[in-house]
Amino acid sequence: MNPNDTIAAISTPLGEGGLAVVRLSGPRALAIADTFFTPIGRQAPKPSAAASHTLHLGRITLAGRVVDEVLLAVMRAPRTYTREDVVEISCHGGLLPAKLVLDAVLAAGARPAEPGEFTKRAFLNGRLDLAQAEAVADLIHSRTELALRAAHEQLAGALSQRIRALRDHLMHVLAHVEAQLDFPDEDIAPETQARLLERLDDAQEEIRKLLLTAPEGQLLRRGVRAAIVGRPNVGKSSLLNQLLGRDRAIVSPLPGTTRDTIEETANIRGLPIVFIDTAGLRESDDELEREGMRRSRAALDQAELIVHVLDASAPLTAADQRDLAGLASRKRIIVLNKSDLPLAFPADALPADTIRVSCLTGAGIEALKDRFRDLLWTGQLHAGTDQVTINVRHEDALRRAAAALEPARQALRAGVPLDLVALDLRTAVNAVGEIVGQTATEDLLDSIFRQFCIGK
């Protein structure tokens, strides 16, 4: 990436729509815009002469012909997303208009942006730290309101503030230890040692609290995979439709209707849950049905949560009993469907926490949603800025920091040579700094930003 280049990309999703936006950013953004944009109006200024944060009506030309009539926004550095000069062109939606406008921009001297390059420039220019930049991607990919709110908290700096405070704590101790290395014949005063150890204890406790948010952070960002399993015709597809709030799976009184797995994401009490509707588990001579069951068992093995559906109106079979026992060690919810019908077996044959529902009437569905929330979500995410959820990268960095911090604490207590203490402390400081990008390598930045879409 050359920061002296001016980059351009379509920043809206491809496809037909009312509008599309083409974005330019870089030192020559305004000069390049002058060459392809013709303002409408006798005294309308060229982009390079326009005031910052203004809109201008005009035409885009390519090879001497008009390709679209647009609104062009002029935003001068540093009050822009990238802290560079930025031009955003709102053109007519659709694949062809946006492509032709982008072609005109590239022909005038801009180069195509790499994935996430606009946000990477925002990071490199100091507008966002690395944790905030990641929150931009989380915002785009949010599938529930709870996930969106968590991303907003991170973008606003809630996590960054805590990480910077943690790093400052560690840097304070490291500075004392390194200063003491200049006086090898003198020991650290007992009261100073006690204060340093107290700071390290506080740092360890903060790391512990942040690590506790990792499961919820992963759940909000990628969801949890929940396999809906059970014998044929117990109502698995009907349950999926109830949870989605729409008819996604074909429902039929004939057993074996579902021959393949169906995956859909549902917003359950603010949590993204990927439900996999599976083929009914039974013995069969039908080749297609056997393949469906093979895929069902593969989905069952890979699932993080099992939704085991039983039929209240049919006696429990040996296969039911076997599956109930076999899945007991897994995280699961037992759902007794068709509870509007008379129960065909003793009520105490199932665990006490079984959820009774009727996919026909909708009874019990809300209680089932509550069970999903209670089973999967143990955190407390409120509107306050002190609530954060870390991602996998943050978790790895914090675990490395904790692993380096523990021997540093023990060594400081035991009076081990301070150069060894300093080495462990520096490792912890660098690991924590990776989270906000203070010690990030180019390879790390590339791995993060290549996950962004082009145009963001």
Image: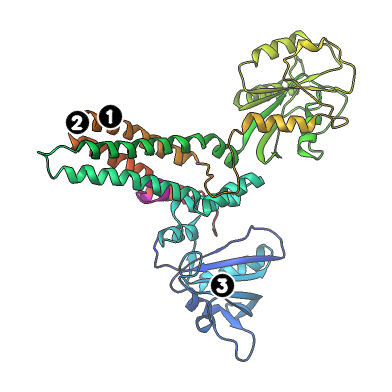
- The Cα atoms of the two marked residues, 1 and 3, are separated by 63 Å
- Left-right relation of 369 to 37: right
Residue topped by disc 3: 104
Q: Compare marks 2 and 1 and give the one earlier in the sequence.
A: 1
Residue 395 x/y as whole percent: 45, 37
Instruction: Identify whether 244 is placed above or below 34.
Output: above
Residue 257 x/y as whole percent: 81, 27
Residue topped by disc 2: 416
Q: Write down the region rendered in magenta.
A: 433-442
Measuring 65% from the left and 13% from the top, which residue is drawn there? 326
Within-10-Å neighbours for mark 2: few <14, some 14–19, many 20+: few
Question: Which element carries disc 1, helix, strand or loop?
Answer: helix
- The Cα atoms of the two marked residues, 2 and 1, are separated by 9 Å
In which quadrant will I find the N terminus?
Answer: bottom left
Q: Amino acid at mark 1?
A: Gln
Q: Compare marks 1 and 3 and give the one earlier in the sequence.
A: 3
Residue topped by disc 1: 410
Q: Are marks 2 and 1 in contact (CB under 8 Å)?
A: yes
